[in-house]
Amino acid sequence: MKNLYKSLFLNNRFFYALGIVAVLFVVGFFVPLFFLVAKVLLFILYLLTFIDIFLLYRLKNGITLQRNLPERLSNGDVNKITIVLKNSYPFKSHLSIIEELPFQFQKRDFIFPLDVLPNQVKTFFYDVKPTERGVYNFGETNIYTNTPLQLATKKYVLGQAVVLKCYPSFLKFKNFDFKAFHNNAISYGTKKIRRIGHSLEFEQIKEYVSGDDIRTLNWKATAKRNQLMVNQYVEEKSQPVYTIIDKGRAMQMQFNGLSLLDYAINATLAISNIILRKQDKAGMLSFSKKLEDLVVAEKRNSQMRLISEALYNLKTDFSESDFGGLYNVVKRKITHRSLLIVFTNFETMDGLNRQINYLRALAKNHLVLVVFFKNTALNALINSKTDNLQEVYDSIIAEKFMYEKISIVNELKKYGIAAVLTTPENLTGDTVNKYLELKSRGL
């Protein structure tokens, strides 16, 4: 009986009908015929309500549900959740499904109206898009069931509360895998081919054929064989590549619900996957006031799991980033020449000038690639129509800041430091493309 009180609700239709009966009772004081009609209608209403409740409760499990959640959520991506419902009632059920979503989504009225035929199994989907990493608590699924009479409602509390972890974006792996390896396929099937590069990994000496790079001519072998011979190299593998994430306050700017830090984290996960697929060693570290979360560059099977776990709870401390401390730790910890991909953000030349000496020091022993962000809000301001003097001033100032961004790229290149200036949305693709370019050039 206690469970009945908790799960039973009377619908608006019942109260509307009861209100009409009450009006008829009032009228019946003046016209006795209406008093009799009101009593008959009240009896019919109670009878129909009793039948409605009986139909709802005659089956203990009239509605069953299976909710399929992913093992983990991908940050910044659309994650699909599947619900499979079965109606065991011998009548068409009118359902209202309320999902108890994690508080991070800020949705308190996540309701699905649904009609399910007798003994029908129905599958439907909904999408969630997390915008921050961490733990997400999915509650139970509440289902409110009505018969065709719709006088009473039975509440089912189905499913179980589930805790999911939201990791940096991993759903884009296939897209970037395809972009990274599309050159390995030919139109009539696929085969393994040797990619000829200009790295220091020597493969063999062979006869010169038209199209070979004359810079690889081996003059000693040419003199000995009395015909042109060239050195052949293959793409050097197992090179260490570190992604370095700036966790300082400059990375907390928001774009489309995600911070620059989150975009950098998602890009790190995607490019680490490409690095390992390219047979290089992937590693990562983060820094602000001090260096943290160091994952040494390796090519082992568990490397992606280690990187993913290191990125999972990466948070900022809103401090000024210490590039000097980064240089000191890298000098001690990373002794082999490596590609260092630094995700950071410089808004002005003054901001770069405070750190340029440390970046130049890193570039003496490593190949440094600095990745920073365009301010898309400035682009919108520059391209907007100006109607008054204040808007003209705003547009000129915005152009000045955009010019400084381009000047930062040129300043870095002047000291032999590669740079990528990109929008947050294109960060992953542009960084992957730059890594592939550097690798193809044998740098």
Image: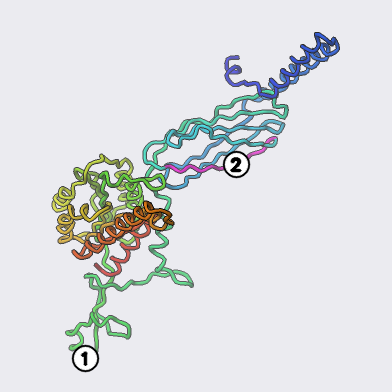
Q: Is residue 120 magenta?
A: yes
Compare residues 4 and 434 and report the one nearer the observer: 434
Depicted 429 relative to depicted 250: above or below: below
- Which tag, 1 or 2, sits closer to the chain's start? 2
> Mark 1 Cα within 10 Å, few/some/many (few <14, many 20+)?
few
Residue 415 visible to the viewer: yes
Q: Identify which residue is drawn at 30% across, 48% down.
A: 307
Q: Identify which residue is drawn at 75% across, 19% down.
A: 20
- Name the residue carrying label 1: 226
Percent across and percent down for residue 185 are 43, 69
Give, as a single range, the part of the protein colored magenta: 118-130
Q: Is residue 426 magenta?
A: no
Tag 1 secondary structure: loop
Q: Quadrant of the N terminus?
A: top right
Percent across and percent down for residue 10 are 65, 21
Compare residues 313 and 194 and report the one nearer the observer: 313
